[in-house]
Amino acid sequence: MHDGSMATLEEVVEHYNSGGELHPNKSNVVRPKNLTTQQKQDLVNFLKTLTDE
């Protein structure tokens, strides 16, 4: 994440999949996604293709 609290893309995907942390300023749009293990892996794999040198 932007503050270094998560070391991997997998951790970030899991964070958002779970709905994030409770916070008074959290948007109502951020809520549990209930992705399957395969969907999370597919998302990580896709995001890793979005690179450039």
Image (cartoon, helix red, strand yellow):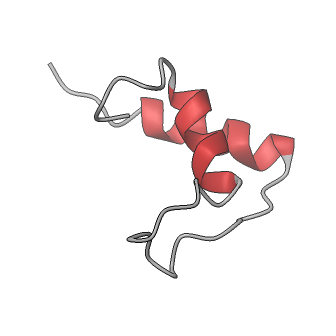
Counting from the top left corner in percent of width and height, residue 9 is at 51, 29
Give the image quarter of residue 20: bottom right
Counting from the top left corner in percent of width and height, residue 43 is at 60, 45
Counting from the top left corner in percent of width and height, residue 11 is at 60, 30
Q: Residue at x 51, y 79 (%)?
A: 29
- Please give the count of numbered marks on the rendered protein: 0
Q: What quarter of the picture does the C terminus occupy?
A: top left
Q: Residue at x 61, y 44 (%)?
A: 15
Relative placement, left or right, of 36 versus 53 is right
Q: Residue furthest front?
A: 24
Relative placement, left or right, of 44 versus 7 is right
Q: Is residue 45 visible?
A: no
Q: Is residue 30 visible?
A: yes
Q: Residue furthest bottom?
A: 28
Q: Residue at x 28, y 29 (%)?
A: 51
From the viewer's side, name the closer residue of 52 and 3.
Answer: 3
Give the image quarter of residue 42: top right
Q: Residue at x 38, y 34 (%)?
A: 1
Q: Residue furthest left?
A: 53
